[in-house]
């Protein structure tokens, strides 16, 4: 064994630890900034459901533009830290942006405020989270650790922050935003010590990548078969989840109590999610990649439809807890599906264009109409309509998703 080979496990443990710290801090910032965003828009700024939908649409239009760029750059630079440094600096700007730019603009001109917020939130917490996850998956494949074992620290960070977010929001939403900015410090410190590097073969593959290689993905039937699930089921699930905190808060005696309880429920849900992220690889190994995607998306449909059928804090809380089961299985299955059916050098492009871009496209289109539906039909009826549409796409995706590659004989 050479000295370089012997040092690889040590480098892997170092990369695992530092990326876990970065994930924890980043998702804590995301929780403080986004977990109660719909409440901030409605209660602090007084926006209607339709106006809130417009703001969310702008967020995802901006992410829509950023995701292909993030994907191509991620595949081009490989394990270099450029994107992680950019995200750290953007997170540091959270409090100044929300307090001195976003809020005044939304009050004076909704459209320009939505555009500015979309640019910041899309780059930092929407497209940015997918770029971070793609980088982590690449590092895991290089150093031999599971992506989900790092991602669970992100869930713990989100849970830790979400537990306090509702109570702090009730005191002053600016406290949440200042904490979000402060989390940039451990993120940037982790990058100082992170020395992840790709092999010579991986560097050559990354440097030879051209835009034409990335866009060629769009011509493959297998890609569009995969997108049926993404554009259909998972998109509808995300648009359902956008204003769920508002509906959840309405189940309590006062909105303030509802926000506080939602923060604590989200924290409990994400702690369970973290545990499931550890277990999810075993589940996907047992049932297969395609079945993992179908299982996770099936649970999504149950949660959407169930939220339209049940009432009361306890029953609605049970629907929220389903998220802790489906998300880990979905995350592991998505990365394994991409690795199994497409070129590894295009992994980030496929994830950022297929999954992330697909989500943003759907959400940019759907957020406004669904927000208006909440105002006119109410939350329960809208949830049942979303669930019915998602079920149609789920049935179609059972035929369009590619089968798992045959496993080598033992």
Image (cartoon, helix red, strand yellow):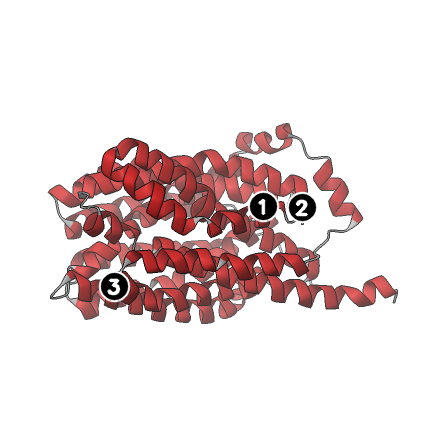
Element marked by disc 1: helix
Q: Are marks 3 and 2 in contact (CB under 8 Å)?
A: no
* Viewport quadrant of the N terminus: bottom right
Label 3 – label 2 distance at C-alpha: 43 Å
Q: Residue at x 35, y 53 (%)?
A: 34
Query: Looking at the image, which is closer to me, 145 or 242?
Result: 242
Q: Is residue 294 left or right of residue 343?
A: left
Query: What residue is pinned by disc 1?
Result: 83
Label 2 neighbour load within 10 Å: few <14, some 14-19, many 20+: many
For marks 1 and 3 on the same chain, the one whose residue lies earlier in the sequence: 1
Residue 269, located in which quarter of the rendered image? bottom left
Element marked by disc 3: helix
Q: Is residue 288 visible?
A: no
Q: Residue at x 19, y 52 (%)?
A: 43
Q: Please provide percent x and percent y for residue 341.
A: 59, 45
Q: Please provide percent x and percent y for residue 105.
A: 29, 37
Q: What numbered label is drawn on residue 78?
A: 2
Query: What residue is pinned by disc 3?
Result: 171
């Amino acid at each position: 064994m050479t000295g370089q080979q012997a040092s690889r496990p040590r480098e892997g443990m170092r990369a695992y630890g530092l990326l876990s710290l970065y994930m924890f801090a980043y998702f804590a910032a995301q929780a403080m900034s986004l977990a109660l965003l719909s409440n901030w828009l409605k209660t602090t700024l007084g926006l209607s459901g339709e106006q809130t939908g417009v703001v969310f649409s702008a967020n995802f239009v901006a992410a829509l533009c950023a995701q292909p760029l993030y994907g191509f750059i991620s595949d081009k630079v490989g394990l270099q830290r450029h994107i992680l440094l950019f995200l750290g600096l953007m997170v540091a700007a959270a409090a100044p942006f929300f307090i001195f730019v976003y809020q005044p603009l939304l009050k004076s001109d909704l459209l320009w405020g939505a555009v500015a917020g979309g640019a910041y939130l899309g780059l930092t917490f929407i497209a940015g989270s997918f770029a971070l996850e793609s980088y982590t998956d690449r590092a895991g494949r290089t150093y031999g650790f599971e992506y989900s074992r790092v991602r669970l620290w992100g869930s713990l960070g989100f849970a830790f922050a979400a537990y306090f977010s509702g109570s702090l929001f009730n005191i002053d939403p600016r406290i949440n935003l200042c904490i979000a900015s402060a989390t940039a410090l451990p993120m940037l410190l982790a990058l100082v010590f992170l020395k992840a590097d790709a092999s010579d073969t991986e560097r050559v593959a990354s440097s030879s990548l051209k835009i034409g290689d990335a866009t060629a993905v769009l011509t493959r039937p297998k890609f569009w078969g995969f997108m049926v699930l993404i554009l259909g089921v998972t998109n509808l699930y995300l648009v359902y989840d956008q204003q769920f905190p508002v509906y959840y808060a309405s189940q309590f005696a006062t909105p303030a109590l509802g926000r506080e309880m939602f923060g604590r429920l989200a924290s409990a849900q994400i702690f369970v999610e973290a545990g499931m992220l550890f277990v999810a690889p075993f589940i996907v190994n047992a049932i297969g990649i395609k079945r993992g995607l179908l299982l996770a998306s099936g649970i999504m449909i149950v949660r959407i439809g169930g939220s339209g059928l049940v009432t009361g804090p306890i029953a609605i809380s049970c629907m929220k807890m389903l998220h802790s089961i489906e998300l880990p299985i979905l995350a592991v299955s998505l990365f394994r599906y991409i690795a199994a059916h497409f070129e590894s050098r295009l992994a980030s492009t496929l994830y950022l264009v297929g999954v992330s871009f697909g989500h943003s496209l759907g959400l940019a289109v759907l957020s406004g109409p669904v927000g208006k539906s909440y105002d006119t039909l109410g939350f329960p009826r809208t949830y049942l309509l979303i669930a019915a549409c998602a079920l149609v796409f789920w049935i179609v995706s059972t035929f369009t998703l590619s089968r798992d590659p045959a496993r080598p004989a033992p």
